[in-house]
Image (spheres, helix red, strand yellow):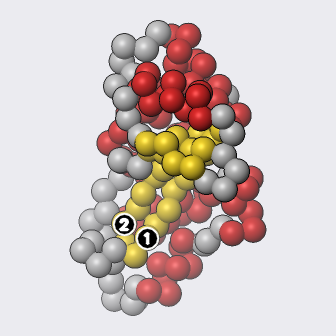
Amino acid sequence: MGKRCSEVEKAYAAGFLDADGAIMATIEKHREKKFGFRVRVIVKITQRDQKILNWFLKTFRVGKIRQNRTAHDWLIRDQKIVAEILGILMPYLKVKKFQAQKAIKILESSINSSKDLYRAANLADALSRHNVRSNGRRKNFMIMIKEHCSRND
Protein backbone atom coordinates (compact mmCIF):
# COMPACT_ATOMS: atom_id res chain seq x y z
CA MET A 1 0.00 0.00 0.00
CA GLY A 2 1.48 3.30 -1.05
CA LYS A 3 5.00 1.90 -1.03
CA ARG A 4 5.02 1.75 -4.81
CA CYS A 5 3.91 5.37 -5.05
CA SER A 6 6.32 7.90 -6.44
CA GLU A 7 7.36 10.88 -4.33
CA VAL A 8 5.23 13.06 -6.61
CA GLU A 9 2.14 10.89 -5.98
CA LYS A 10 2.74 10.99 -2.22
CA ALA A 11 3.07 14.79 -2.30
CA TYR A 12 -0.05 15.05 -4.48
CA ALA A 13 -2.05 12.91 -2.05
CA ALA A 14 -0.77 14.92 0.94
CA GLY A 15 -1.89 18.11 -0.80
CA PHE A 16 -5.41 16.74 -1.06
CA LEU A 17 -5.39 15.72 2.59
CA ASP A 18 -4.15 19.21 3.56
CA ALA A 19 -6.79 20.97 1.45
CA ASP A 20 -9.85 18.72 1.29
CA GLY A 21 -9.22 16.14 3.97
CA ALA A 22 -9.68 15.52 7.64
CA ILE A 23 -7.83 13.58 10.30
CA MET A 24 -10.33 12.82 13.01
CA ALA A 25 -10.10 11.07 16.35
CA THR A 26 -13.10 9.76 18.15
CA ILE A 27 -13.65 7.88 21.36
CA GLU A 28 -16.62 5.57 21.25
CA LYS A 29 -18.33 3.45 23.85
CA HIS A 30 -17.39 -0.17 23.26
CA ARG A 31 -18.53 -2.86 25.64
CA GLU A 32 -15.77 -5.33 24.71
CA LYS A 33 -12.97 -2.95 25.74
CA LYS A 34 -11.60 -3.07 29.29
CA PHE A 35 -12.54 0.53 30.17
CA GLY A 36 -15.68 0.62 28.03
CA PHE A 37 -14.27 2.82 25.24
CA ARG A 38 -12.23 2.49 22.09
CA VAL A 39 -10.18 5.16 20.38
CA ARG A 40 -10.39 5.47 16.60
CA VAL A 41 -8.60 7.66 14.11
CA ILE A 42 -10.17 8.20 10.71
CA VAL A 43 -8.66 9.76 7.59
CA LYS A 44 -11.05 11.25 5.05
CA ILE A 45 -10.72 13.15 1.78
CA THR A 46 -13.85 14.74 0.30
CA GLN A 47 -14.49 15.65 -3.33
CA ARG A 48 -17.59 16.42 -5.37
CA ASP A 49 -16.20 14.47 -8.32
CA GLN A 50 -15.60 10.83 -7.47
CA LYS A 51 -12.91 10.42 -10.18
CA ILE A 52 -10.05 11.72 -8.04
CA LEU A 53 -11.14 9.51 -5.15
CA ASN A 54 -11.02 6.53 -7.50
CA TRP A 55 -7.35 7.48 -8.07
CA PHE A 56 -6.77 7.28 -4.29
CA LEU A 57 -8.47 3.89 -4.13
CA LYS A 58 -6.48 2.57 -7.10
CA THR A 59 -3.15 4.06 -5.98
CA PHE A 60 -3.21 3.17 -2.29
CA ARG A 61 -5.47 0.08 -2.54
CA VAL A 62 -7.09 0.83 0.80
CA GLY A 63 -10.20 2.50 2.15
CA LYS A 64 -13.57 2.89 0.57
CA ILE A 65 -15.54 5.57 -1.20
CA ARG A 66 -18.81 6.66 0.33
CA GLN A 67 -21.31 9.16 -1.05
CA ASN A 68 -22.66 11.79 1.31
CA ARG A 69 -25.31 14.42 0.58
CA THR A 70 -23.27 16.67 -1.70
CA ALA A 71 -19.96 14.92 -2.33
CA HIS A 72 -17.96 11.71 -2.01
CA ASP A 73 -15.54 10.67 0.73
CA TRP A 74 -12.52 8.38 0.57
CA LEU A 75 -12.45 6.91 4.08
CA ILE A 76 -9.83 4.91 5.90
CA ARG A 77 -10.92 3.48 9.25
CA ASP A 78 -8.58 0.52 9.76
CA GLN A 79 -6.19 1.72 12.47
CA LYS A 80 -3.09 -0.03 11.10
CA ILE A 81 -3.72 1.36 7.63
CA VAL A 82 -4.45 4.86 8.98
CA ALA A 83 -1.06 4.79 10.73
CA GLU A 84 0.68 3.63 7.54
CA ILE A 85 -1.02 6.25 5.35
CA LEU A 86 -0.19 9.05 7.79
CA GLY A 87 3.41 7.82 7.94
CA ILE A 88 3.65 7.82 4.14
CA LEU A 89 2.12 11.30 3.76
CA MET A 90 3.66 12.96 6.86
CA PRO A 91 6.81 14.32 5.14
CA TYR A 92 4.64 16.17 2.60
CA LEU A 93 1.92 17.53 4.87
CA LYS A 94 1.97 21.25 5.61
CA VAL A 95 -1.42 22.24 7.05
CA LYS A 96 -2.33 18.99 8.79
CA LYS A 97 1.12 17.91 9.98
CA PHE A 98 0.26 18.71 13.63
CA GLN A 99 -2.97 16.72 13.36
CA ALA A 100 -1.15 13.77 11.79
CA GLN A 101 1.41 13.81 14.61
CA LYS A 102 -1.35 13.80 17.26
CA ALA A 103 -3.18 11.02 15.41
CA ILE A 104 -0.04 8.88 15.29
CA LYS A 105 0.47 9.41 19.03
CA ILE A 106 -3.06 8.20 19.60
CA LEU A 107 -2.52 5.17 17.38
CA GLU A 108 0.76 4.27 19.08
CA SER A 109 -0.65 4.44 22.59
CA SER A 110 -2.03 1.38 24.30
CA ILE A 111 -4.78 1.68 26.86
CA ASN A 112 -3.91 -0.37 29.92
CA SER A 113 -5.23 1.98 32.59
CA SER A 114 -7.76 4.75 33.02
CA LYS A 115 -4.85 7.23 32.89
CA ASP A 116 -3.97 5.90 29.44
CA LEU A 117 -7.59 6.38 28.38
CA TYR A 118 -7.57 9.97 29.72
CA ARG A 119 -4.33 10.66 27.84
CA ALA A 120 -5.90 9.35 24.62
CA ALA A 121 -9.00 11.48 25.25
CA ASN A 122 -6.83 14.58 25.71
CA LEU A 123 -5.05 13.85 22.43
CA ALA A 124 -8.38 13.29 20.67
CA ASP A 125 -9.68 16.60 22.05
CA ALA A 126 -6.48 18.38 20.94
CA LEU A 127 -6.86 16.90 17.47
CA SER A 128 -10.52 17.86 17.16
CA ARG A 129 -9.76 21.49 18.09
CA HIS A 130 -7.86 21.73 14.80
CA ASN A 131 -10.74 20.45 12.68
CA VAL A 132 -12.49 23.61 11.58
CA ARG A 133 -15.77 22.01 10.53
CA SER A 134 -16.22 20.19 13.84
CA ASN A 135 -16.60 23.42 15.85
CA GLY A 136 -20.36 23.20 16.29
CA ARG A 137 -20.52 19.45 16.80
CA ARG A 138 -17.32 18.73 18.71
CA LYS A 139 -17.48 16.44 21.71
CA ASN A 140 -15.25 16.83 24.70
CA PHE A 141 -14.00 13.26 25.04
CA MET A 142 -12.31 13.87 28.39
CA ILE A 143 -15.58 14.98 29.99
CA MET A 144 -17.43 12.08 28.36
CA ILE A 145 -14.98 9.56 29.85
CA LYS A 146 -14.89 11.18 33.28
CA GLU A 147 -18.69 11.06 33.44
CA HIS A 148 -18.65 7.37 32.59
CA CYS A 149 -15.72 6.14 34.72
CA SER A 150 -15.77 6.00 38.49
CA ARG A 151 -12.97 7.47 40.58
CA ASN A 152 -11.77 3.97 41.46
CA ASP A 153 -10.98 2.97 37.84
x and y percentages locating residue 75 in the rendered image: 49, 45
Quadrant of the image for the C terminus? Answer: bottom left
x and y percentages locating residue 72 in the rendered image: 60, 44
Query: From the viewer's perspective, is 19 left or right of 62?
Result: right
SS label for mark 2: strand
Q: Are marks 2 and 1 in contact (CB under 8 Å)?
A: yes
Which residue is the site of mark 1?
28
Residue type of the residue flagged with mark 2:
Arg
Q: Which mark is residue 111?
A: none
All told, the count of numbered labels is 2
The residue that appears at 50% across and 62% down in the rendered structure is 26
The residue that appears at 59% across and 40% down in the rendered structure is 45
Quadrant of the image for the N terminus? Answer: top left
**Closest to the observer, 60 or 138:** 60
Q: Residues within 10 Å of mark 1 (few under 14, many from 20)?
A: some
Query: From the viewer's perspective, is 111 left or right of 124?
Result: left
SS label for mark 1: strand
Which residue is the site of mark 2?
38
Q: Residues within 10 Å of mark 2 (few under 14, many from 20)?
A: some
The residue that appears at 43% across and 14% down in the rendered structure is 5
Q: In this view, does 97 lie above or below 13?
A: below
Residue type of the residue flagged with mark 1:
Glu
